Each structure stands twice: as structure tokens, then as C-alpha cells.
Amino acid sequence: MQPHHLELLAPARTFDIGIKAINHGADAVYIGGPSFGARSTADNSIQDIAKLVQYAHRFHSRIFVTLNTILRDDELEGARKLAWQLYDAGVDALIVQDMGLLEIDMPPIQLHASTQTDIRTPEKAKFLQDAGLSQIVLARELTLPQIAAIRDVIDTERTVIEFFVHGALCVAYSGQCFISHAHTGRSANRGDCSQACRLPYEVKDAQGRIVAHDKHVLSMKDNNQSENLRDLVDAGIRSFKIEGRYKDMAYVKNITAHYRKLFDEVLTERPELAASSHGRSTFSFEPDPNQNFNREFTDYFVQGRKEDIGAFDTPKNPGQPIGWVSKVTAEHVEITTDDPGTELHNGDGLCYYDLQKELVGLQINRAEAAKAKGVWKLFPKDPMDGFKDLRPGVQVNRNRDMSWVRTLDKKSSERRMGVWMQLAENNDGLQLTLTDEVGLSGTAHMAIAWQAPKDPAQAEDKLKTALGKLGDTLFEPLDVQVALPRPWFVPPSQLNALRRDAVQALEAARSAGLHRLPRAVPVEPPVAYPEDTLTYLANVFNQKARDFYAKHGVKVIDAAYESQEELGEVSLMITKHCVRFSLSLCPKQAKGVTGVQGTVKAEPMQLINGKEKLTLRFDCKPCEMHVVGKIKKSVLNAVPESPVQFYKSRPVVGLH
């Protein structure tokens, strides 16, 4: 991808969702293969991926496959074989976390740095570029100036900078959370996170006082950078990634279409930029991110630290306000809508907050419009007496609109490429040339004797109309020229055959015109890693990964947390989110506040969920929070899948 191209990168859980992502405007799709994909239930067969590649390449869209778990020594050979199978299937790039993959016999396929590689600094970004990574996704926590600083050290001819613009936010720096493994033995770095961050916690201060009760203080709102796209382009982002390899078809359709429309506006304003794939998508619906599951939205740290990034009340989807309860009976609830034009439907999902600020779901079995406009009688699926604190005056939100769901269940987009068509005479008949929007052409010839038309005055218009019927092909006519020296009559069956052959010729030319993305060549001699010591935070889980870092000058290399050598209390999560700041207990916030300045200190706090206890420690200089704990005995006592062969004490003398 050239530096002036913008790439909209969409997720796909399955082959079918991948097809819809392409149709709704994705320039590239990332999807999991049969294994090693960091999403344990989002695997796909090589055969399905090959079919998706074939379809995407017709638009010059690309397919990237995730191979981004950390690997045991005994898994490297399986990962190597899978990489070759994916290469043979036509996949354009592999998204990787484990640097051990760079030390084995991989195919000449482009490699991209996974979000799990935790790229926050210019030094780390430049190192990964020089080590042979062609596309790097930056940490979601970065600000615009920090992104621009990375752009300034990157050779944009060699490396594309990628950034998440939408979807669920992991509260930790990616790759820097080990709570799941410590508590359950399920590793986030191996695609099996237990999501402790979405649980409710009691928060206690250093004196044991409760400062928050039953709050989801590690649960973030969802990422939405819709308002920041132009700023991100200016800061150097060229690949814009939508989170969601677990998400359903409707989410991928809607969110891909939403960003496709926004980027098409940017491309219209900025002629020096272009989409990285071809064709234009049109939609039978108006994209709206609020219609999909979300925890409300935040643009996180892109424009600087803000107080309202957390979804502390609930990790569920609170939906959009639609009205308030006007009456409650034993059989139904009556709702008065804020907008009298709002319609409710059988099957809609509604919700409200009870007095404890817990979100209560209210699924509607039957919706009836009352006589008064804007008033609806709603008969829930569940018994009325089970709805806690449902009373007149309570605000009601809708988090599932069945009319919207049905719209997205149907065909909802078309993706077509414009072509110029020219019909001309040659020595033994006719030739039809199709030229697409990027200048690729296909020509078909037909040996046919000239026949005079019955109505010479209308002959040209009839030929244009017939030729322009491109039907269910990928193409639509931009202009049809009939460059004939004399009027012709061409039998419809022969004209159809000529058009069909020309379409096939153009498809073949487009296929030949799509070149494999080149594998980057690492800088020689190997550049030095920015640090000479690596702790468990570097996620080094196999000997080849260790060899990689040793080759790049690292002297001390500890094993990954999953090797279970860190038995005491350590940082199980590092995050830019700060509970103190969100609860207005940050020493920096207190500066200059009379009577408060100097009394608020960044003392540790404690998170409690049942028997689980975690300590919060605050590192104010980089403005980061550490969630501290230790691995459970039950995890240590569990039989490992396979022994980890990581030689922590192996001498590094002589390695270079």
C-alpha cells in the first residue's frame, strides 16, 4: 500500500462476514485462521480463507490473517506449516505478536505487528520496522502528538501505520494484561481472556474506606474516532482498524458502512489521497453506530486525557433514550416516547436503570400503539412483577430495534467498479474494450459479418443500451461509446457473448494487475532493541523468540508470565486508565484547589470482587496505573498442555 492510500480495515469472524465487509466498503479484512489467532472461538478453515481471498482480490481488497498468539516451542512447527498454507491460499499478510516467527522458515509473506506488540514509542515502532514488519498498529492509548512523533521516525515508504478507530476497548495496554492467566490459567496472549476487566469491584483506599461500591471501574466505553479521522490522517495513520472479530454480521455491515461513508467524504476533500482498493459501495440503509451493541462511546486518549472514558455502571449496552414510563399495570407497561414519531416493534429490546443503577432488560413480546400519539402499550416477554423499580417517570432506553435488525438481515449493499466501454470495428468483425477506474483494460473480439440495421438512426442507441446491461457483474458503465464507421445490427445473443467475454478479460487483467505485498527485508546487521533487559512483560514464550531478542542485543531475557516463573506479586495489568483520576482523587487534579492541595496522594487502592483482591498502584510520572496481584495456586497446580521449554538461565555469551 502506497503512503497516500487510506485503508479501511474491517474484522470478520467468519467467511460470510468477510464477504459482507468487502461489499460494505472494506479495503482490507482481518480474520482468524484455523489456530493461533488470539480469539479462541473465531477460527476459519484454509478453504474458506482461500475463497475469501479470491473474492476480495476482485476489488483489490486485501486479506490479513491473525497468527498473533504467543507460542510454545512445540507449537512453532505447526505455526510455520499454517503460515505456508495461508501463503499458498493467497493471503496478503499475517498479523503476528510472537517474534519467534521471524526466526523460523516462514513464507515470503508480509508480516504486520499485532496490537499485542504494544507499540507506544517511536523507538519501538522504528525497531519493528527495521526488524521486518511492514504494518504496525499503534497502542489505542496514544494522543495525536504521540502518533505524529512515531510517524516522524518511520519510513512511510516501507511501513504503514495502523490505528484502531472503533469497537470495544481493552483497558490494558494490549499484551500487558495477565489477570486472566493469574486467576484462571486462561491467557489473553493466547486468545482466551476471561475479561476480569468487565466485573464489578468494590474500591477501597489505603485507609480501608470504600470509595466506590459495585462499580465496573476497569470497564471502558467503546472506541469511536468518527470525529477524529482527519486529525488521524494528518498525524500519519494510513490504516484505520475496526475492532470486532467476535462481532456479528450486522455490526460489521453497519460499522464498515459508517466509516466507508466518512472516508469517502475525506477522499473527496483530499484528492492527494485515495482508497487502497477499488469500487464504490452503496447502501440500502443509513449507517448508525448507535444501533449496534455499545457501552456508549469515547475517543479515549486521542485528544488528551478525559474523565468520562469509563463504563462504570454497566458493561452492557445501555442503548438510546426513547421515552419514559407513564403507566404500569399487571400485564403491560405504558411508554410515552420523547419523539411522537418513534415507532416500537414486537421483539424490541428496552432497558432502564433501577434504583441501584443496575441496568434491567425489558424485552418486548408485543407492542401496541395507544390512541394518544407517542404512547405505546408494551407487553414484555417476562412477567411484570419481576421488573424491579419499574414505575412512572423512569427513563427507558432501546438497545435493540427489530426494524433495524430486519433491515440488516437483508441484502444491504452493492459494491461496483465503474468502467468505460468502447465498441469498435476490426478487420473481421467487432471488438469491445472495457477500461476500469484505475486504467486496467480487457478486450474481447468477435468475428461477425456486418449487417445493416432496420432503423439506422436508432442503431447506435440500441447498441449502447444493450452493452450497458452489466447485470450482476462487479462493473457498472460510466460511459458507453460506439465508435463504428457505419451503423450495425448485432444479434442480442452475440452482443451478450461479446460483453461477457470483455468482462472476463477485464477480470483477468485486474487479477494480473494485483501484486503480492512484498515481505520486508530486515535491516542488516540487526538493529539494537531499545532496551537491553526484558522482563516477563515482553511475552517471550519460546526459544526462537529469545534468540530474536538476543540477536538484537538484549542481554537479560525473562520468560513470559505464562511460563509461571513469576510467583510473587507483580503487575498483572498496566493501563493508561486511572481509577484515581476517574473518581476525582488524582493529586494532579487537586493542584491549586484550596483546602485540597497536598491532601490527596497517589496511595495504593484495592479492588475486591468476592474473594478476588487486586492492588492498584499509581505511577504518576508516566501517568499509568498498575493492577497488582499474584498467580493462584490452582493455576500453578494445573497440568500444563505441554511443558514449556524456555531456558531462562541459558547464557547469552557469544550470541550476536
Image (tube, grey):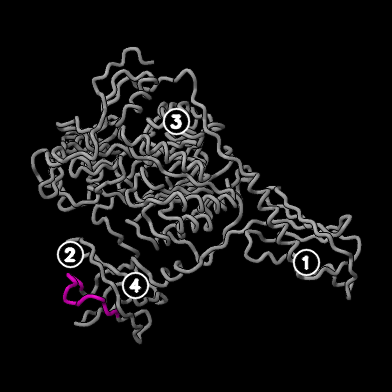
Of circles 1 and 2, which is in front?
1
The three-letter amino acid code for the residue at tag 4 is: Asp
Q: Please provide percent x and percent y for residue 405.
A: 41, 68
Q: How many marks?
A: 4
Q: Residues within 10 Å of mark 1 (few under 14, many from 20)?
A: few
Q: Which residue is mark 4?
A: 348
Q: Please provide percent x and percent y for residue 521.
A: 52, 27
Residue 610 lies in the magenta-colored region: no
Q: CA distance from mark 1 to mark 2?
A: 74 Å
434 or 353: nearer the viewer: 434
Q: CA distance from mark 3 to mark 4?
A: 53 Å
Q: Residues within 10 Å of mark 2 (few under 14, many from 20)?
A: few
Residue at the spot x=87%, y=60% of the render? 484
Q: CA distance from mark 1 to mark 4?
A: 53 Å
The three-letter amino acid code for the residue at tag 3 is: Asp
Q: Quadrant of the N terminus?
A: top right
* Extent of the magenta region: 378-390
Q: Which residue is mark 2?
A: 355
Side of 261 where 594 appears, left or right: left
Residue 389 lies in the magenta-colored region: yes
The three-letter amino acid code for the residue at tag 2 is: Leu
Side of 225 where 191 appears, left or right: left
Q: Which residue is mark 1?
A: 494
